[in-house]
Amino acid sequence: MTEPVKVNKQHDLHMRSRKQLELTGVQNVESFDSEEFLLRTELGHLTIRGNHLHIKNLSLENGILSLEGNVQSLIYLDPGAHGKNKGLLGKLFK
């Protein structure tokens, strides 16, 4: 019997002065506006909140996203916590 090949998931985030974000391992942009981005990454869902947020560069084929604006918070959801979250984010990521 052969063992299944393990795929190393990778997701990196680089922030400069809370004004610029560069992310890798982005699978999808679920929703976005100037105050909140909801992303699905290789390592789970990520919520980015702030002011005047906008996309500088996006390539889902390469898993790259660059944002600019005033970043206030970054929140990750555990990949297995989908059914446990009863709040707004839990409902969005069923």
Image: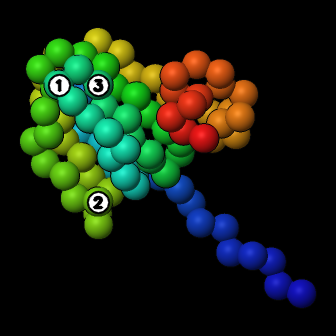
Q: CA distance from mark 2 to mark 3?
A: 18 Å
Give the SS element for disc 1: loop
Rendered image quadrant of residue 71: top left
Left or right placement of residue 94 versus residue 14 in this view: right
Q: Residue type at mark 2: give it.
A: Leu
The mark closer to the camera, 1 or 2, is: 1
Q: How is the image coloured?
A: rainbow
Rendered image quadrant of residue 13: top left
Give the SS element for disc 3: strand
Q: Residue type at mark 1: give it.
A: Ser
In this figure, which residue is indicated by the disc labeled 2?
60
In this figure, which residue is indicated by the disc labeled 3?
36
Give the SS element for disc 2: loop
Report whether residue 35 is seen: yes
**Residue, x 53% and y 56% (percent of image)?**
9
**Residue, x 89% and y 87% (percent of image)?**
1
**Which sits in the foreground, 11 or 83?**
83
Within 10 Å of disc 1 (Cα), the crowding (few <14, some 14-19, many 20+) is some
Within 10 Å of disc 3 (Cα), the crowding (few <14, some 14-19, many 20+) is many
Q: Going from the N terminus, do you reach mark 2 or mark 3 first?
A: 3
Q: Position of residue 14 (x, y in %)?
A: 28, 34
Q: What number is the disc on residue 34?
A: 1
**Residue, x 44% and y 45% (percent of image)?**
40
The mark closer to the camera, 2 or 3, is: 3
